Image (cartoon, grey):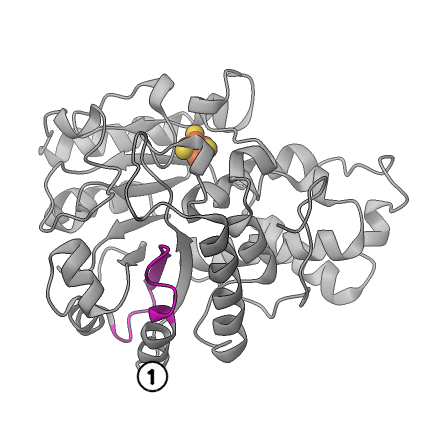
Amino acid sequence: MEAKHLTHSTSKPDTGAGEWKFSDLIAEPHVRERWDRVRRYFFLRESTYDMTNRCNIRCEGCYYYKGEKQHAHEVGDPEKWRSLMKSEKARGITYVVLAGAEPSLVPELLTVCHEEMPLGSIATNGLKWIPGSIGYKIHISVWGNDDTSQRVRGAKQMLQRQIENYRGDSRAVFVYTFTPHNIAEADQVTRILAREGCKITFNVFSSPVGYTGALRHTESSLRQTRQAMLNLLQRYPETVLYSHYNAVSHTHHLGLHALFGCSYPRCNPSTDIGLGRSFRQYRTDLNWDRDAACCVPDTDCRDCRHYAAGSAVVTARLFRHACEPDVFASWLDYVDTYLAVWVTGYDKGVNLCQRWVAPPGHDLF
Ligand code: SF4
């Protein structure tokens, strides 16, 4: 979810690569307006932080409890976190993602981070309320209806408890992770969230390295997921933060890396510009490892369709989407969705492209 790469592209639009000049692509007033709106956020520069290695539940397929990072010791001193945030700011970071294992267990650290770095988001299971003074976006993970959550995550009445904590809270976005087995349940979950006035966006289960379990997607489940996403987007436009192009990008049989080329350090040896230069993924001991650094460490890159990954990988590819009007409009819809999900105070606009568009250079599926 790194809009910063756009700055490299937008300062000098590519006017020679195809028939369409960039000025033609933004000639329509409503497209121009969207472009002007989203490019105000190109200053965002992201890094991510594991706040604690504890969690109050255990979910099948959780990537936090894979690899080495789970064994890092915890630095629980708020002043050490404050000084980390100050040094992050000094090296140009403007946006923080506070994550694994369960950040709501350490509200004193979240408070310090927010005091130093006002823009960011928290990835939580939503079972413990995060104080309202912490003005980050709050992403609440949902893996199906309550029966499925009890089976896969070992928590009872999960959606009900999440809603009780975050109903009416403009920080909150529920993130529904599609697995091959919960596609039909998304309708019930979205209907409940719509009734409660909550917002939802979609994620696609992306296997941790070495995972061969039943949650891994197949081509068939990806196609079904794509159609389910579209149905929900059309049925609940006030509730669902998504677009056609989000659905295409995240349910393609090729993962995000194959489609767009991931620029997180794990996949990108270059340290010259963009994520390869600035992104770090801090563990609970406040150390980081460039070779493991991405927003979803220990995820299998070949199976990566994660919403957080796409927020950086797709938004960074302005050049290749600035080729014809529907492709560019689709990309704008993707960036508009990303901002509505990740940035406090940004409201989703009406999608500009209401049809399937293939990622440049690829088929639709
Ligand atoms: S897991 Fe995804 S975001 Fe991470 S390096 Fe691989 S492709 Fe990139």
Residue identifier under label 1: 195
Element class at badge 1? helix
Q: Is residue 166 left or right of residue 272?
A: left
Q: Position of residue 100 (x, y in %)?
A: 22, 40
Q: Position of residue 298 (x, y in %)?
A: 31, 30
* Residue 163 visible here: yes
When the figure is inspected, residue 294 is found, relative to residue 318, above or below; the finding is above
At horizontal 16% and vertical 30% (from top left) the residue drawn is 70
Residue bounds of the magenta highlight = 167-186
When the figure is inspected, residue 245 is found, relative to residue 273, above or below; the finding is below
The quadrant holding residue 303 is top left
Amino acid type shown at disc 1: Arg
- Please state which of residues 356 and 287 is positioned toward the viewer in this rendering: 356
Q: Position of residue 263 (x, y in %)?
A: 52, 28
At horizontal 86% and vertical 45% (from top left) the residue drawn is 21
At horizontal 81% and vertical 46% (from top left) the residue drawn is 22
Q: Is residue 54 left or right of residue 134?
A: left
When the figure is inspected, residue 331 is found, relative to residue 350, above or below; the finding is above
